[in-house]
Amino acid sequence: MISKIIASQKITEVEELLNKYDKIVIVTHVSPDGDAIGSSLGLYHYLNDLGNSVNVIVPNSFPDFLKWIPGAKDILEYERYPEFAQKLIAEAELIFCLDFNVPKRSYHLGPFIEAAKGKKVLIDHHPEPSDFCDVMISYPEISSTSELIFRLICRMGDFEVMSHESATAIYTGMMTDTGAFTYNSNSAEIYYIIGELLKKGINKDQIYSNVYHNYSEDRYRMLGFTLSEKMRIYPEYNTALIWLTNEEQKRYKVKKGDTEGFANLPLNIKGIIFSVFIREDNEMIKISFRSQKDFPSNKFAAQCYNGGGHLNASGGEFYGTMDEAIAIFEKALPEYADLLNKK
Ligand code: 5GP
Ligand code: MN
């Protein structure tokens, strides 16, 4: 048995909404990752199998290494079909907001979600959610939104209903948000849940391979270039920085998702507990932070780039030049010297 993390009152509220409504939209955050797509499709299959009319809408495209997940072909990209997406959101009786904590994290979709008349349910694990949904299922101590979807389905008494497709999507999200169970994954219940998913016939080894053995040669060569030419170590702060310009990414024909995982790699270096990846993304600059132990990367992201996220994985955005973005980072670093040198 797993413990009852989600409050019973919230389970009842979701059950009541599902009894009443069947025109459902599922939305998630911009540049969807494995947990965003995994939780959305896990819930999508479950609700579809119950006979609802369900649409998954994402703000923009997602990486090829997630496109094999059952149901991924049915996902609607707002940037490709904005009017159709707006219509579906406006007409939905029920909207599930997955894996984000504030409307602006769903970019273009944010204003339409806020304006929508349908009832809204948040299911998420990011700290400090804003109160924009009728039912707020927010548990930052849980390592993935996909795990929350599993818990929700089970608590509604529907483990039997969960399909192989739904289980596969849920496992994918649990796996990707924990770096294949290498961080944020010390809870015994995660492994109990994996056992239950295996009973649904998921092929966990194949799922790992589908996600992590799926990169292009260009992506790998760009990774080599980044680690050899574009990495700066700050030994006095146990910190590493990597950065890539638009021009450098173009040289390696970068595609959506090709830089996924880069931010984690400097943490492999002995002693490094804080890793920062600054990447030009067309007209803006995207910053990704990763940390170890209790270093609050999300506090750094909030202070320097108006961002946020989890303690050990966070991010932000910046509008300006690469040199300015790096200067902001280097200026703030000494303020964190004590935390970075904590034994
Ligand atoms: P990534 O580095 O993989 O893009 O993002 C890691 C985590 O940081 C995300 O799961 C999300 O919680 C957070 N994050 C990334 N970018 C932003 C941002 O611009 N604003 C906020 N508030 N959080 C972000
Ligand atoms: Mn997540």
Image: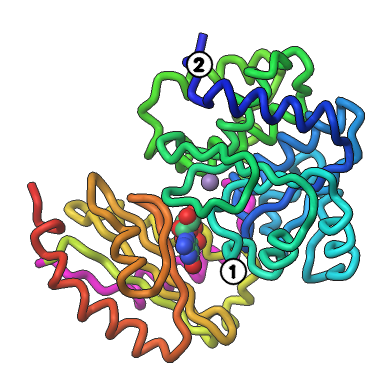
The residue carrying mark 2 has its beta carbon less than 8 Å from ligand 2: no
SS assignment for the magenta stretch, majority = helix
Q: Residue at image x 23%, y 54%?
A: 273
Q: What residue type is labelled 2?
A: Tyr
Residue 269 position by quadrant? bottom left
Q: The magenta stretch spans which residues?
A: 212-236
Magenta segment: does it hold 234? yes
Residue 130 left/right relative to 98: left
**Vertical order, 205 against 176 (above or below):** above
| Mark 1 crowd level (few <14, some 14–19, many ≥20, 10 Å Cα) | some
Q: Which amino acid does label 1 sit on?
A: Asp
Q: Residue at image x 67%, y 58%?
A: 63
Q: Real-space Cα distance between discs 2 and 1?
A: 38 Å
Label annotation for residue 192:
2
- Residue tagged 1: 218
User: In x, y percent, where is residue 256?
Assistant: 64, 66
